Amino acid sequence: MNKTDFFLDTEHAAQAGGAIPCTHISRADEESCKNDPCLLIVPSVFGFNSTFMLHCQRFIDKGMQVYSLDSFWRTCPGALEADEAGMPQAMARMAALTDKDCDSDLSALTSYIRALHPGVPVIGLGICFGGRPIVRAACDKEIDSVVAWHGVRICELGDRLQTLDCAGVLHFGSIDAWTPEEDCKALQQRFRNKPHVEIVVHQGCDHGFTHVNRPSVFKQEAYDAAFDSVVKLASP
């Protein structure tokens, strides 16, 4: 697995005092994988941590290449672990990030990917915090298909979700306080006439059921289903 860190210089990033830190992960021979499907991931509020790398290794093994950005580069860059020390920082930096800045960063990376890999499908995956921005990107026609793993506050997008016209699978846990049962039902109702978007509620699962390094919430069966939905969308 090859990991390359790079920076995107864009006008809006320069105005904020820097460039957007991004990462590309691919098979060892980058030249041979340039036409592999591109998976654009917006990680959880903990960023590019050890759990994220475990996901990426599996995606690479399935024939994809991964792009990701550090959404919190303005205030608190870098990875955090989901522990007692990392949690307060994670919540603070999520609160400090505006939707406008997050969407601009994501759009810049999407444009970069499409210029570098013309004609290659771009699948979006948002994990936890990343679920809402990746769904917004799908609503704005930035990506070709979308998956969210226990994404937070997606229901708050309201009528904007009516513009979600690409294939998508949104996974939630039935006991997730971040997306309570009534929100899951509201999403299912909203997409009842849009069969290309599937709302999957995993019974008995709490928030973070795909976090393989957190045994208190991890659920293997739900994780396998969530992972397989990405692989299916990336398949020709």
Image (cartoon, rainbow, N blue to C red):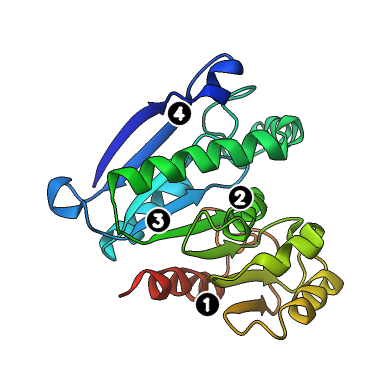
Q: CA distance from mark 4 to mark 1?
A: 33 Å
Residue beneath the point at 72% across and 56% down: 152
Q: Quadrant of residue 121?
A: bottom left
Residue at screen point 72% across, 69% down: 162
User: In the rendered image, which residue does mark 1 sit on?
Assistant: 221
How far, Cα to Cα, is label 2 from label 1?
Answer: 22 Å
Q: For residue 130, which numbered disc appears in the image?
A: 2
Q: Check disc 3 and report the residue beneath it.
A: 39
Q: Nearer the viewer, mark 4 or mark 1?
A: 4
Q: CA distance from mark 3 to mark 1?
A: 22 Å
The image position of residue 195, as x and y in percent, is 61, 85
Pointers 2 and 3 in contact (CB under 8 A)? no
Whether pointer 4 and pointer 3 mark residues with C-beta atoms closer than 8 Å, the reply is no
- Determine which residue is flagged by label 4: 21
Q: Earlier in the sequence, mark 4 or mark 2?
A: 4
Which residue is situated farthest in the right direction here? 182
What residue lies at 57% left-to-right and 80% top-to-bottom? 196
